[in-house]
Image (cartoon, rainbow, N blue to C red):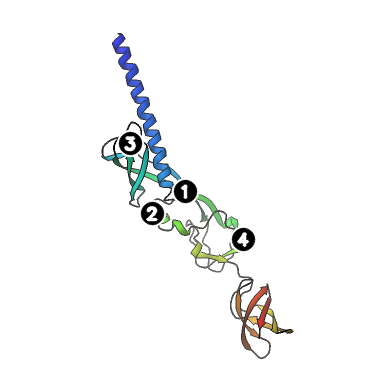
């Protein structure tokens, strides 16, 4: 009876030790994968499949050997000896997902999008993980450059900052030559942002000039 009880306690201890090793391994894998997916929340979604060796009793270090792009990574574990395994995982990042179709030129608003976690370890989200619009983006200061489909996440290439001046807007043109300046009216020939360069059609002479947008609606041209 004593030996049976001793064997039972030893078996329970072995189970506990294995669970501790598994938990530590998962933590090491998550930390290693996080370096490949900055800002993402890493989740282990499946049991490790061992390619060479088996679970070390005391995993010390994990190195990612490859990420095949379907939410699966190959890794090595440094312990008493090196072992290699595959594991399935998800890398969750927040993204602005359109709740309806957004058309080119349409000004964005928070109610057009729902902030959702997307798995950037697999599928299209993985391909575009570097250009997903950040959750901190001020949507009300942006407009769509191209169509954003309902259910898709907004990408930096699909939006742009709303210009301070649009093509066709009336602007004041300040012509400067040394200490002399003259104000006339003109028309912006292209969109522009404050402190950026912009082409304008000045006054009745319809001459194209290039200047700096010094303030919304004001273009300074050095002659």
| Residue 123: mark in rendering | 2
| Residue 140: mark in rendering | 4
Q: Is residue 219 left or right of residue 98?
A: right
Which residue, given by chain and number where applicable, does mark 1 sit on?
40
> In the image, is residue 18 above or below residue 201?
above
Q: Where is residue 222, by image quadrant?
A: bottom right
Residue 204: image x %, image y %?
Answer: 68, 90
Disc 3: CA contacts within 10 A as few (<14), some (14-19) or many (>=20): some
Q: Residue at x 57, y 54 (%)?
A: 136
Q: Where is residue 175, by image quadrant?
A: bottom right
Nearer the viewer's eye, disc 2 or disc 1?
Answer: 1
Q: Where is residue 207, by image quadrant?
A: bottom right
Q: Earlier in the sequence, mark 4 or mark 2?
A: 2
Count how many numbered circles sit on residues in the image.
Answer: 4
Q: CA distance from mark 2 to mark 3?
A: 33 Å
Callouts 4 and 2 close, C-beta under 8 Å: no
Q: Residue at x 59, y 59 (%)?
A: 139
Residue 89: image x %, image y %?
Answer: 38, 44
| Residue 79: mark in rendering | 3
Q: In this rendering, does residue 33 appear at all?
A: yes
Secondary structure beneath label 4: helix
Residue 68: image x %, image y %?
Answer: 33, 51
């Amino acid at each position: 009876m004593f030996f049976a009880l001793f064997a039972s306690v030893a078996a329970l201890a072995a189970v506990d030790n294995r669970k501790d090793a598994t938990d530590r391994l998962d933590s090491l894998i998550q930390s290693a994968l996080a370096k490949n997916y900055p800002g993402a929340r890493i989740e282990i979604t499946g049991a490790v499949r061992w390619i060479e060796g088996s679970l070390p009793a005391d995993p010390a270090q994990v190195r990612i050997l490859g990420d095949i792009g379907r939410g699966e990574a190959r890794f090595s574990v440094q312990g008493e000896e090196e072992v290699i395994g595959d594991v399935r995982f998800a890398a969750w990042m927040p993204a602005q997902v359109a709740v309806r179709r957004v058309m080119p030129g349409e000004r964005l608003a928070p109610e057009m999008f729902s902030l959702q976690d997307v798995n950037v370890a697999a599928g299209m989200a993985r391909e575009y993980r570097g250009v997903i619009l950040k959750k901190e983006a001020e949507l009300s200061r942006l407009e769509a450059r191209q169509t954003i489909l309902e259910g898709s996440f907004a990408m930096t290439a699909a939006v742009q900052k709303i210009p301070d001046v649009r093509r066709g807007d009336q602007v004041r043109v300040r012509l400067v030559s040394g200490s002399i300046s003259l104000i006339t009216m003109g028309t912006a020939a292209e969109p522009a942002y404050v402190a950026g360069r912009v082409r304008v059609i000045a006054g009745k002479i319809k001459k194209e000039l290039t200047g700096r947008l010094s303030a919304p609606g004001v273009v300074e041209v050095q002659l």
